[in-house]
Amino acid sequence: MNEPTIVSFLCNWCSYEGADKAGNARLEYPANIRPIRVMCSGRVDTELVLQAFREGASGVLILGCHPGDCHYKKGNYKTRRRMLLLRKALAQFGVEPERVKVDWVAAGEGERFAKVANEMAETIRELGPLRLPLSG
Amino acid sequence: MAERIGVFVCKCGPNIGDRIDVDSVVAEAEGIEDVVTAKSHNLLCSEDGIRFLQEEIRKGGLTRVVIAACTPKQYEQKFMRACEGVGLNPYLLQMTNIREQCAWVTPDPAQATAKAKSLVRAATMRATLQEPIEKKEIEIHPDVLVVGSGVAGLEATLTLAQKGRKVYLLEKSPCIGGLGARFEEVYQTMECAPCMLAPELQEVLQKENIEAITYGELEGVVGSYGNFTVKIRRKARYVSEEACIGCSACFEPCPVEVSNEFDEGLSKRKAIYIPFAGALPNVPVIDEANCIKLKGGECNACQEACPFDAIDFDDQDRIEEKRVGAIILATGSTQFNPSSLAQYGYGRFDNVLTGLELERLNASNGPTGGKILLKDGREPRSVAFVYCVGRKEKGHCSGICCMYSVKLAHLLKEKIPGVEVYSFYTDLCLPKKEHQRLYEEVVEKGVEFIRSNGSERVSRDGKGLVVEYKADSTSKSLAVDMVVLAPAIEPNPDTAKLAAILDIPLDERGFFSEEHPLMKSFGTPLEGVFIAGCCQGPKDIGDAVAQGGAAAGRILSRLIPGEKLELEPIVAVIDEEICGGCNTCISICPYSAISRDEEKKVAVVDDTLCRGCGTCVAACPTGAARAKHFTNEEIFAEIREVVR
């Protein structure tokens, strides 16, 4: 593969369906966006993100329902808070915080999914592959 | 023992087949450890495809199945049933989406094929780790508690009872019927509300499987969907429901007079009373706050007058427990009190009324026998309605004030020939198919609509009233005899209390928060607890009835006598060996599904409440919380393969 991988956690109720809608509309985005379905964006723990980097991902995209729309009420807020902290911690270790992105895509928003996916791919393309400072 | 994995790649005709090199994906799968068979099929979801799949599972003795095809949202259930049909636990199937999220979005076939390979590897490695999940079923109690006997509660009660369900209908006031009983006529049919309600109320009281508990309150609830135990306080009525025949002989001799809530304080009632003539059940109640005897004084007037020995001053509150499978809250709403907005003069000036007060003046069983009169007994010659009172303060349109104000304007025009009627409004909200007609009719009859955008100020001028307002950027004023305010609808004070008892959320305005505002406006986030009518938000009678019916229907379709209730299989579990008892999960669970085992000092998940979001798993600092079907190990395996 030419481009560094972006692990994309998609919540079952909104973002996964949003990604499906992008497919239905035959919208294009780079193949390095690799989806993993979770029930809720609130399930995405910092551990999962760090594991993705450890395995060689160069970016992690976490997509949930729009604020106020979470199928489980507030899971998306929880992940947003968690990832804000993680981004700060990553910066201290010399990892660009832009490599972790939390965003919202509703079940009907195929266009938005493709847009967010393309933007993230562009960000990671500019940053280049992640070289973990502490990997070994 | 090594797993026997089968990988099946669907071509979906040309949809996947023309864009991905399926053969090379199959070849990739063949190379994965424990994969004993990897095949492609032209259309796996077809009858032939399902047969092929089942045959492969049987023939190969497969212990795990991976299907690379369309989105699992489309056919996952079908494939799960296919697995189940040949004895394979459906949770040992993993689907991966190589159509919507691969073939259709990746123009370059080589890249699409590479992505598909990585998705297939991820699904396969994940499948190896998947565990069978057994469907959990629990015994249920089919009885239902309905709280509130207004139109929404009545509809729910009768719908349930018609299907033979035992229903406890709990009402806090002494009689059933709710707010509707106070309206002489309702929008837009001008039908008599008591007449509309009477057959329903009688049916409630007569049906054997409905137990109407009036003058009662919900005090506590434990348990969960299918198995709630509710604690009900039956307040002391001091009149025996068995002995009393409703002859009313006790009212006359009672020496106490207090203002009558049913008439919005516009009439008097005795300390022993029924809210209105014809209230059901036709059994009086003694108001302990005002009864001389119950306050410790000397008086036996009602007891002496009762020919049936029905009065019992020693009556006491009783607490009863009932077991029910589901609860419907239909507790209604209340009116915003306009006296907090000084500009309207409500509570300070005579003849400034609320819409509900005018309803009572208009009612033939009201304080004036249906005559609309000013405080001094004259008929008003001019009346001004002020719409949207408190809308800005409450932040919502109550949706029904325009209707009833138009209705009351119409009634005024009918009852008092020549009366001048003005309507000061900001926005008119009359959205339903028949709703505009009455508005057009009153305009034709000469009711003047003035768009004053909330600028109205009411003052007194001698015996009359003056409305000052701004319209078309000019300040104007209008002298009238009567001002009728249309105040916003707000949650009644019991709403917060009930929310605390049931542990269900309120929205920012204090109404019960619905599970989904459009798709499930009658559900709450707590399984088995439903809401109907104005306790969910302001609405008209028709909408309230529809919600009551919907809530009852949900219960009838899922809580079936003799059948067990199937629970969400994908739930969280907490390993008590690892749990440190920090309570983090308890505080963040959106469904209050986790509680603390005080003896073991660990957290425990209640399967009947958990919906499997995994928030606790992400938050658990020790890794004791696991999400079934979405374990860390399973997700790690996926990550490893999609990155590789």
Image (cartoon, coloured by chain):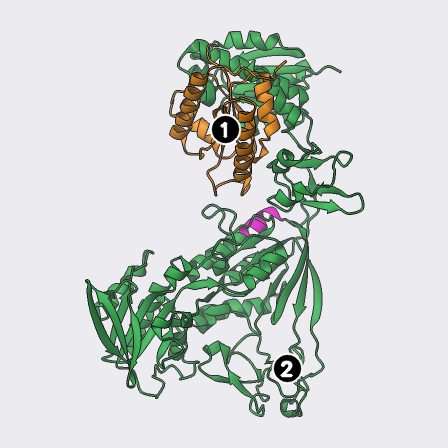
- Residue type at the position of mark 1: Gln
Provide the residue span drawn in magenta.
Answer: B552-559
* Residue B371 marker: none
Which x, y percent locates residue A46? 59, 29
Residue B41 visible within the image? no
The chain assigned the colour green in the figure is B
Residue B277 drawn in magenta: no
- The image quarter containing residue B299 is bottom right
- Which chain letter matches label 1? B
Instruction: Looking at the picture, tell me which residue is in the foreground, B164 or B573.
Output: B573
The chain assigned the colour orange in the figure is A
- The image quarter containing residue B632 is top right
Quadrant (top left, top right, bottom left, bottom right) of the C terminus of chain B? top right
Tell which tag, 2 or 1, sits nearer the viewer: 1
- The image quarter containing residue B252 is bottom right
- Residue type at the position of mark 2: Cys
Residue B392 visible within the image? yes
Residue B553 drawn in magenta: yes
Locate residue B538 relative to residue B174 in the image: left or right. left
Which x, y percent locates residue B435? 32, 60
Note whether B265 is above or below A27 in the view shown.
below
* Residue B244 marker: 2
- Which chain letter matches label 2? B
Quadrant (top left, top right, bottom left, bottom right) of the N terminus of chain B? top right
- Same chain, marks 2 and 1? yes
Judging from the image, what secondary structure is the residue with disc 1 in?
A: helix
Instruction: Looking at the picture, tell me which residue is in the foreground, B61 or B254.
Output: B254
Which residue corresponds to the image point at 45% horizontal and 27% vertical from the top-left?
A19
Residue linked to disc 1: B74
